[in-house]
Image: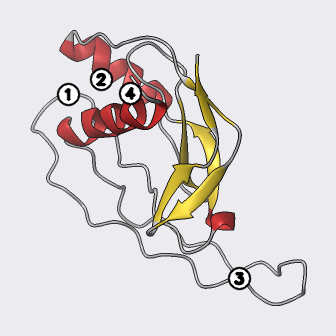
Amino acid sequence: MSPRAAIAVAMAALLFAGCAQPAGTPAPSPEPDRAGSALPEPLPPPPLEEAPAAGTVVPEVDTRCRVDADCAVKNVGNCCGYYPACVNRDSPTFPELVARQCAEQGLAGICGYPEIRGCACVEGRCEPSDAESM
């Protein structure tokens, strides 16, 4: 399985599980870049999805971007544990909630993860710019 396919499967699993972004997440203030100008305003939070009635709910990880600098490699977790992905640098991740949800639902995952060396903003979404499967 290619690294992009593995990431797509992991992200689809999170979406399938009824992920939602927590309401009221404060937006960070712009920081000056190396040239001294302010970075673009942060992206608005993604729309909320309806949460399931019971069980652990994992909020959605924001992968939206405008420029490569909006992206970072973070541990988003999966049913095996550690799982890196390119996400918005300001987005929280919830690997402990992913693990709890896997346990509650009796889910197992395909273990292994890509080694992501960098991220790029591709069509408004953070994607690995150079990844190798492990």
Judged by depth in the image, the label closer to the viewer, 3 or 2, is: 3
Viewer-proximal residue among 91 and 64: 64
Quadrant of the image containing the C terminus: top right
Secondary structure under the numbered disc 4 in the rendered image: helix
Tag 1 residue: 55
Instruction: Please tell me which residue is depicted at 90% across the width and 78% down the height of the picture.
Output: 34
Where residue 44 appears, as percent x and y from the top left, is 43, 76
Tag 3 residue: 39
State the CA–CA distance, disc 1 to disc 3. 39 Å
> Could you say which disc has been placed on residue 98 in the image?
4
For marks 3 and 4 on the same chain, the one whose residue lies earlier in the sequence: 3
Tag 2 residue: 101
Q: Mark 1 near mark 4, Cβ–Cβ under 8 Å?
A: no
Instruction: Please tell me which residue is depicted at 63% across the width and 85% down the height of the picture.
Output: 40
State the CA–CA distance, disc 1 to disc 2. 7 Å
Could you tell me if residue 89 is visible in this image? no
State the CA–CA distance, disc 1 to disc 4. 11 Å
Q: Name the amino acid type tagged 1.
A: Gly
Q: Name the amino acid type tagged 2.
A: Gln
For marks 1 and 2 on the same chain, the one whose residue lies earlier in the sequence: 1
Secondary structure under the numbered disc 3 in the rendered image: loop
Where residue 107 appears, as percent x and y from the top left, is 24, 13
Q: Name the amino acid type tagged 4.
A: Val
Q: Mark 3 near mark 2, Cβ–Cβ under 8 Å?
A: no
Viewer-proximal residue among 8 and 132: 132
